[in-house]
Image (tube, helix red, strand yellow):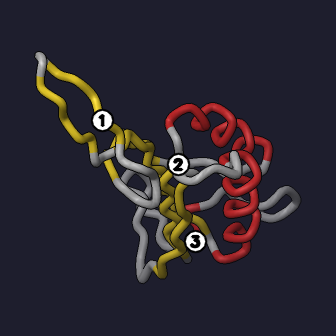
Amino acid sequence: MKLIVAIIRPDKLSEVLEALYRADVRGLTVSKVLGHGGETDRVETYRGTTVKVELQEKVRLEIGVSDHFVDVTVKAILGSARTGEVGDGKVFVLDVEQVHRIRTGERDEAAVTPPLVGQT
């Protein structure tokens, strides 16, 4: 099992969600975050003072998947979030030791991914 963490541009969220839905990837968490990567710094004027803005608004997606959903999920994110410009974001794939679904008590793979079509 893996936890996929993606940091993307806020304006790409709808496209990414649509791509994940088409790939049958369900169950995710979305958070608004601030971050800084390779983007150039912005300078803004706030109340007559020039301020260097170092943090950019981003969206963080967290998706728990079974191993056979990793490539599908990553490809959906990469294909829909890419603009080709600096600041497109990153995708991290992390190992997960255990998962428990609170409602049903399901554990591990049964708790993170719906069964594939035709499987029970």
Mark with earlier residue (3, 1): 1
Q: Residue at x 44, y 43 (%)?
A: 59
Q: Residue at x 54, y 48 (%)?
A: 27
Query: Which residue was labeled with disc 3?
Result: 109
Query: Which residue was labeled with disc 2?
Result: 8
Q: Amino acid at mark 1?
A: Val
Residue 110, picture quadrant:
bottom right
Query: Which residue was labeled with disc 1?
Result: 43
Q: Nearer the viewer, mark 3 or mark 1?
A: 1
**Residue 67 position within the rendered picture, expressed as x and y whole percent measured from the top left:** 66, 77
**Residue 47 position within the rendered picture, expressed as x and y whole percent measured from the top left:** 11, 16
Q: Amino acid at mark 3?
A: Glu
Instruction: Name the side, left or right, on which 1 lies relative to 120.
Output: left
Q: Quadrant of the C terminus?
A: bottom right
Work out whether residue 98 or residue 5 is closer to the camera in this orientation and state it.
5
Q: Nearer the viewer, mark 3 or mark 2?
A: 2
Residue 48, picture quadrant:
top left
Q: Residue at x 18, y 30 (%)?
A: 50
